[in-house]
Every structure is written in structure tokens, then in C-alpha cells.
């Protein structure tokens, strides 16, 4: 990694070797998962927590503060993994049950929830295994770098991208793998912004895309949609990093989600 590209703002101020996107809500400095303590709004760094404790007496029992400070656990990733397993179990119940959660062209008109549940539709053991491994290795890292809310927004925006592409261009069913492609691309964009060029991720995505064009005929449409949506979401993350831009970031992410949902609904209804 070149030092010229390396921006100290992207690293924990207490652990300069750890990349992170999460800022202390009080002082605005970057903090890694280990240094985050959940506050009423956002997270606080250890120094701000100490200062706040000195000015206000401890009101909660020690056990409560010990539990609430566990913001370093990637609970969103584990929840998505659990939902993926649930999606796979549904496909085992019957071959058709999966269509209640997967997304087909026009699904939004009949089963509107599928624009979100498609992210958990696994139709084979290989598919659920691939998704669980990808979430375990990439999801946990992204969640700790982005924070829980941004990570979940990225995951569901990727899924919406896949839905919109399938809606507009046809193609196969949207299932759980699409959002995973979004996570891979987000990882690349964010790491690149932090000064490291992880082209291995791009090669991995490229190879899998070629494979799905040749073998899967159709699933690649959703993958490409997820990649585009995730790239846009990642650009929003890296361009609105300052604490003063929190509101702007929420508006942009919400706007992107709203535009995707409107396109899907409008296309399915006409
Ligand atoms: Zn602070
Ligand atoms: Zn740290």
C-alpha cells in the first residue's frame, strides 16, 4: 500500500492499522469496532466515553453497560446468515414454496415482499453454503468497517439492484447470491478509497460472472444489477464520510432505495 494514497481519516485513531468507516458521534474521529461503545445516537470512542462518565455518575448497573457495549459483534451479518439458512429450509419444504420468497419478473405485483426476501432464497445446498461463507468472511469485515446500519443498507440495496435488473431485462430468478456480489464490489470500492487495490476481488467477481453467463443462463442479469447498485451505495459511503454529512448520506441512500423500488413497481404494474 502506498503511503501517499493512505488517508489517516480512514483508520482507527487508536489502532492505525485498522480500517474503519465508523466515526465517534461526539468527537468525529474514526474508530474500529473494538473502540466503539454504543451510545444513544451512534457510537462513542473510549476517550469520549470516559469524559462522559466523569461528568455524569454511573446510573446503570455494570452488567447492563457491559452488555450494551458489545457493538463489535457482527450481529447483522449473523442475522442475514440465519435468514439465508431459513430460506434454504423453505426450499426443502417443497419445490414451489421457494417462489413465495424468490423474485421472478413481475413478482412485485403479486408478492411485494419478495423484493426483500429474494436475498434469502437459496435453492441448493451449494448455493446456501456459498452465501454463508461469503457472508462470514466478507459480511463481518464490511459490517465492522461500515457500521451495522450502513452494512444492512448496502445489502438490501444490492438485492434491490438485482430485482430491478431482472425486472427490466428478464433473466432468471433473483436469489441470495446477488446481494453477495454487491458486498464483494463494495469491498473493492471501499478498500480502493482507502488506498489498497484489491484486484483479486474484481477477478473473483469477473470469473463468477463469466461462469454464470455460460452455465446459469440468466442469473447474471441480477448479479450485474446488484453490482451497479452496490457500487453506487459504496460511492455514497466514501463521498459522505464526515460527521456533518450524516443527513446527506441517509437522504442519498434512501433516495437510491426509493428510485429502485419505484422502477421495479412501475415496470411490474405496466
Ligand atoms: Zn470521541
Ligand atoms: Zn481501535
Image (spheres, helix red, strand yellow):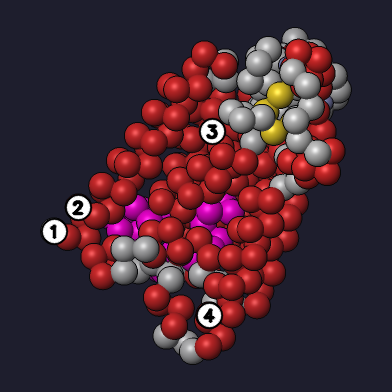
State the CA–CA distance, disc 3 to disc 4.
32 Å
Residue drawn at x 68%, y 12% is 27
* Mark carried by residue 266: 2
State the CA–CA distance, disc 4 to disc 2.
29 Å
Does the rendering let one see residue 127? no
Q: Is 105 rendered above or below residue 222? A: below
Q: Element type at marker 1?
A: loop
Q: Earlier in the sequence, mark 3 or mark 2?
A: 3
Q: Is residue 116 magenta?
A: no
Q: Element type at marker 2?
A: helix
User: Is 258 placed left or right of 126 in the picture?
Assistant: left
Quadrant assignment for ligand 2 = top right
Q: Are marks 3 and 2 in contact (CB under 8 Å)?
A: no
Q: Earlier in the sequence, mark 3 or mark 4?
A: 4
Residue at the disc numbered 1: 270
User: Is 146 placed left or right of 173 in the picture?
Assistant: right
Does the rendering let one see residue 95? yes
Residue at the disc numbered 3: 234
Q: Is 134 rendered above or below residue 27? A: below
For discs 3 and 4, the disc positioned in front in the rendered view: 4
Amino acid at each position: 500500500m502506498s503511503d501517499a494514497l493512505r488517508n489517516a481519516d480512514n483508520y482507527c485513531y487508536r489502532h492505525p492499522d485498522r480500517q474503519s468507516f465508523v466515526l465517534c458521534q461526539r468527537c468525529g474521529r474514526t474508530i474500529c469496532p473494538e473502540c466503539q461503545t454504543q451510545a444513544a445516537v451512534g457510537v462513542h470512542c473510549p476517550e469520549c466515553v470516559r469524559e462522559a462518565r466523569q461528568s455524569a455518575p454511573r446510573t446503570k448497573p455494570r452488567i447492563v453497560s457491559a452488555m450494551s457495549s458489545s457493538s463489535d459483534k457482527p450481529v447483522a451479518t449473523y442475522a442475514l446468515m440465519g435468514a439465508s439458512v431459513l430460506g434454504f429450509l423453505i426450499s426443502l419444504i417443497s419445490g414451489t414454496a421457494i417462489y413465495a420468497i424468490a423474485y421472478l419478473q413481475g413478482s412485485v405485483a403479486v408478492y411485494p415482499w419478495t423484493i426483500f426476501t429474494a436475498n434469502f432464497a437459496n435453492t441448493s445446498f451449494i448455493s446456501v453454503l456459498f452465501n454463508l461463507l461469503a457472508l462470514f468472511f466478507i459480511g463481518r469485515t464490511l459490517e465492522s468497517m461500515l457500521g451495522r446500519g450502513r452494512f444492512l443498507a448496502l445489502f438490501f440495496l444490492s438485492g434491490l439492484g438485482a430485482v430491478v435488473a431482472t425486472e427490466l431485462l428478464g433473466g432468471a430468478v433473483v436469489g441470495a447470491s446477488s446481494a453477495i456480489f454487491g458486498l464483494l464490489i463494495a469491498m473493492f470500492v471501499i478498500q480502493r478509497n482507502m488506498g489498497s487495490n484489491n484486484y483479486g476481488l474484481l477477478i473473483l467477481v469477473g470469473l463468477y460472472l463469466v461462469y454464470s453467463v455460460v452455465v446459469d443462463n440468466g442469473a447474471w442479469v441480477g448479479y450485474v444489477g446488484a453490482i451497479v447498485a452496490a457500487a453506487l451505495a459504496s460511492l455514497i459511503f466514501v463521498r459522505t464520510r464526515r460527521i456533518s454529512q450524516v443527513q446527506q448520506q441517509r437522504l442519498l441512500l434512501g433516495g437510491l432505495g426509493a428510485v429502485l423500488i419505484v422502477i421495479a413497481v412501475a415496470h411490474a404494474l405496466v
